[in-house]
Image (tube, helix red, strand yellow):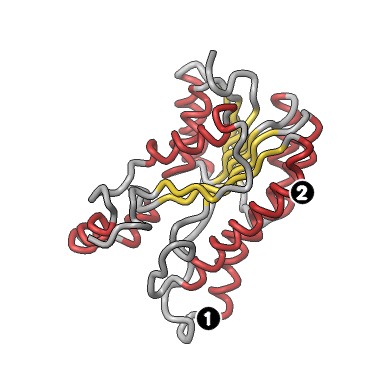
Amino acid sequence: MKALDGKVAIVTGASSGIGRATARLFAAEGAKVVAAARRKQELDALVAEIVAAGGRAVAVAGDVKDAAHAEELVATAREQFGGLDVAFNNAGTLGEMGSVAEVSLEGWLDTLETNLTSAFLGAKYQIPAMLERGGGALIFTSTFVGHSAGMPGMAAYAASKAGLVGLTQVLAAEHGAQGLRVNAILPGGTDTPMGRAVASTPEIQAFVEGLHALKRIAAPEEIARAVLYLASEASSFMTGAAMLVDGGVSICRT
């Protein structure tokens, strides 16, 4: 039996990186996937790949900052697949970089809306649908930045992602008795378009790799396997956790 047989899952930020790898893995493990991102062409290619491998998926393009999009994702899960069991709210942005004195108010607010308010909107519509099925697994993508380490120039990113840990804890406490588990995953450096935007030169990439105890960054598929753990019954007694999957960057001083 596969880890997610009979389950229906929403994955946001599914057009690339961790979201794409997770959508593919969820489908391979038996889930019917509602894949969401802004870029329809990339989503359609992902769905075609999943279907060609024998899985089931549909694409819904839109902006995670839009409440109507969050509602549409849940409606699609219900209409296409009969309900919702798992939601991986993964879409996010680095946002405007720079010191707090330099970052614009518009840049700050856009980062919070993309990384934190979008998660609130996702949960707002996902939770009732999951409770209709007797519970489920709700997962957010946070980060070690702002949790175990401060990185200069990343105030908006760190604050918005740290807010996800607080949201995770409150939702876990609110809904644990109803069978809903809520956890956050905190990746380290990962080979994604966002990660490559930070490590934009070979020298910076080598520096970032060296910050990790493993002296490398993750492949998106490695993070996806940790998300699968939180989505599956393998983590049945885990809720309210901020789970580091960071290659030891949080503890490394070498």
In the image, residue 78 sits, relative to residue 161, either above or below, namely above
User: Which residue is depicted at the point 41% across and 65% down?
Assistant: 149
As drawn, the residue found furthest toward the top would be 1
Where's residue 236, x and y in %? 61, 31
Name the side, left or right, on which 31 lies relative to 212: right
Name the side, left or right, on which 39 lies relative to 166: left
Task: Name the image quarter holding residue 148.
Answer: bottom left
The residue where tag 2 is placed is: 174
In the image, residue 233 sits, relative to residue 154, either above or below, namely above
- Mark drawn on residue 80: none
Could you say which is closer to the camera, residue 183 or residue 52? 183
User: Which residue is depicted at the point 56% across and 33% down?
Assistant: 235
The residues tagged by marks 2 and 1 sit, at their Cα atoms, a distance apart of 35 Å
As drawn, the residue found furthest toward the bottom would be 101
For the N terminus, the quadrant is: top right
User: How many numbered marks, from 0 up?
Assistant: 2
